[in-house]
Amino acid sequence: LDELVRMLSKVYCNTSGWEFSHIVSKAEQVWLAREIERVPAEPSGGAQRALLHRLLNAETLEQFLGKSFPGHKRFGLEGCEALVPGMYAICQRAASHGAEHVELGMAHRGRLNILTNLLQKDPAVLLTEMDETHSDYHVGDVKYHQGLSSRLAFPPDEEIEHGEIPSQGNRAPGLQGYELQVALTPNPSHLEAVNAVVVGRVHARQV
C-alpha cells in the first residue's frame, strides 16, 4: 500500500496536472489514465542536462529577440518554451522507430524558435532578417512565414533518454545515433491553409 501511495503521489501530486475527464470517449479516458499512471523511469543526469540545455536555448532566444527588437512583430514562444525540447524528443523517437522524414506545419507563434533551435537555422541569418533597416534580405514580416528543411542527427548519448531504443532506426553515418530529415512548411497569414499543404506533401512521399 505504501508503494502504491508513493506512486500515485508522484503522478498526481507532482508538478504536472492532468485534465481529461471532459473527453467523451471512455476508451480514450482509460488510455490516458493508464499512460499517466505509468511512472516513467527517472532520466539520467546527462539526459536531464540535455533537456535543460534545449529549454534554456529556447528561453534565451526569446529574451534576446525581445530586448534587441522590441518593436518588431515576432510571435514569440514565451510561456511555451517546452515546445522546443518536446519537438526534439518527438523527432528523436520517430527516428529511433525508423521514420525517415517528418513534415511539420505550424502557426506563426514559436516559428522563429523552432527554426533556430530545432531545425538549426543560422542565428546570424535570423538576426539579419530581424534587422530590417540594415538587411539585404528585406523580408518584412515574412520571417515568421518561412520554412526550412534540415537533417537532424541525434547523438548516441541521448539514445537511452526515454528507455531502450528499437534497432530498426536510421543510423547516422559515423555515429551510433539516428538521422531524420525534418521539414517545416512555409506558412502564409491564412494559418489553416498550411494543413492541406502538409497533408499533400506527406501523401506525395508515401506513394
Image (tube, rainbow, N blue to C red):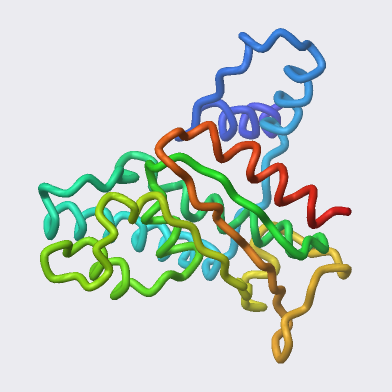
Q: How many marks?
A: 0
Q: Position of residue 106 (x, y in %)?
A: 51, 43
Look at the image and tell me in which quarter the N terminus lies.
Answer: top right
Quadrant hosting residue 2: top right
Q: Position of residue 160 (x, y in %)?
A: 69, 66
Q: Position of residue 197 (x, y in %)?
A: 63, 43
> Which residue is at 56% across, 18% downward?
19
- In the depicted view, which residue is nearer to us: 56 or 7? 56
Query: Relative to residue 92, is residue 83 depicted above or below?
Result: above
* Left-right relation of 49 to 205: left
* Left-right relation of 28 to 36: right
Q: Position of residue 121 (x, y in %)?
A: 42, 70
- Residue furthest out toward the bottom: 174
* Left-right relation of 15 to 153: left
Query: Relative to residue 97, is residue 83 depicted above or below?
Result: above
- In the depicted view, which residue is nearer to us: 15 or 84? 84
Quadrant hosting residue 159: bottom right
> Which residue is at 73% across, 57% downward?
94
Query: Relative to residue 87, is residue 123 depicted above or below?
Result: below
* Left-right relation of 44 to 16: right
> Which residue is at 45% across, 33% downward?
190
> Which residue is at 58% across, 64% downward?
44
- In the depicted view, which residue is nearer to us: 74 or 61? 74
Quadrant hosting residue 182: bottom right
